[in-house]
Amino acid sequence: MGTYLSTVLKATGLQIGAAYGMMAIATIISPLLIGVIADKFISPKKMFTILHLLGGGVLIYMSKISDSNTFNWVLLLYALLYAPTLALSGSLTFAQLKGNEKLFPGIRVFGTIGWIIAGISIDQFLGSKLSLVSTFTIAGVASIILAIWSIFLPNAELNARENINKTSPLIKSSAFSLFKSRSFTVFFIASAFIAIPLSFYYSLTNQFLNEIGVSDAASKMTMGQFSEALFIIAIPFFLRKWGIKWMIVAGMLAWIIRFALFSFGDAAANSWMLIASILLHGLCYDFFFVAGQMYTDAKARPENRNAAQAMITMATYGIGMWVGSILSGFVSNQNTINVTTHLWDKIWIVPAAITIVVLVLFVTFFKAEKDTIVKEIRL
């Protein structure tokens, strides 16, 4: 989307940052409310279907917009529909697994395969001009297909739903009680802050690779998804061996190395640094965000798992990504020589520094015991 906005709609760095901020704003507003509604009043599957069906229509309309400011407002509408599905997809999956969380990584890997198909398709099958123009139409059609497909998912309601006193206040079945755990509170705060560097990666990497002359940038970025697929499958092994704390620490160390490689890499002699940085994506993402989903599901009670997943989504793709999108747009603008030239080495130092601070604080204050967490996740 960053490349689309900069080349087709001629958006500035601040406008691109604002565009990524729309998803973050929506993630702050909608997922927790939708999560509680799905826990209490409506089937999560029905909610998931409705949101993707409506979102698909909005995406198709977005492909016809020619003004970046109008684009951003319509993007906010789509984001309000899409953001809750991030948490709902996790809740639906865990409900289907019925306590067998060890199967989650093997299922989650198919989401990664979807990313790979999308990235390769953009470069290899559609052509750069066609792919930029039709990006949102393709995404809209995919969203509608997903909505139709989800109708046929098995009905796996949360067992605890029947035991909820439906006259009790919503707050009693909310996920806020999780903050009684110091470790979960530290994890929640770290999730919000580590999403700031994630926003830099999402909003700037494709633009960065294209600008410095890397060919077939979208295809090369799919190597990160191949890496993600491998590390997802490896999560149960490392969780048993290291525990949740040191898995998350390893993920954050990978973020620091990734941005350092981006700072020193180029499309010529040091192109290997760019490839290595992309290949670190699996370690960066899986060992923090996917493992974090499993940790959250294990810590939550059955009746508030939808809300708990929504709350973590709000921390990461909401608060963290919103701050990160604004900051990445500002840093990009401050290091712009002209429309097509940036001081990328200085840009990538910022998310690396943020990750170092989060890492130090997390290691200091997160005290979860390895055996306890492994038992909770039932590996």
Image (cartoon, rainbow, N blue to C red):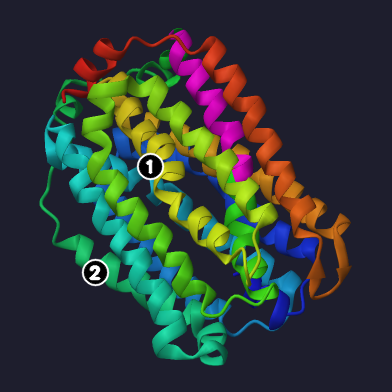
Residue 14 % position (x, y): 80, 60
Residue shown at the point (72%, 57%) measured from the top left: 18
Q: Is residue 166 visible?
A: no
Q: Which SS does the magenta portion mostly show?
A: helix
**Which quadrant is the C terminus positioned in?**
top left
Magenta includes 101?
Answer: no
**Which quadrant is the N terminus positioned in?**
bottom right
> Is label 2 in a helix, a strand or a loop?
helix
Q: Dot 2 surroundings within 10 Å: few (below 14), some, or many (20 or more)?
A: some
Name the residue tied to disc 2.
148
On screen, residue 157 versus residue 227, left or right, reads left
On screen, residue 191 versus residue 335, left or right, reads left
On screen, residue 156 versus residue 5, left or right, reads left
Dot 2 or dot 1, earlier in sequence: 2
Residue shown at the point (13%, 62%) measured from the top left: 152
- Residue 120, compared with residue 183, is above or below; it is below
Residue 73 % position (x, y): 67, 64
Name the residue tied to disc 1.
286
Magenta includes 194?
Answer: yes
Which span of residues is magenta-colored? 181-197
CA distance separating discs 2 and 1: 28 Å
Residue type at tag 1: Asp
Please state which of residues 168 and 92 is positioned toward the viewer in this rendering: 92
Q: Quadrant of residue 354?
A: top right
Please state which of residues 257 and 77 is positioned toward the viewer in this rendering: 257
In the current view of this chain or complex, which residue is farthest to the front? 269
- Residue 11, compared with residue 18, is above or below; it is below
Q: Quadrant of residue 248?
A: top left
Residue shown at the point (45%, 13%) measured from the top left: 183
Q: Is residue 119 visible?
A: yes
Residue 227 % position (x, y): 36, 54
Residue type at tag 2: Ile
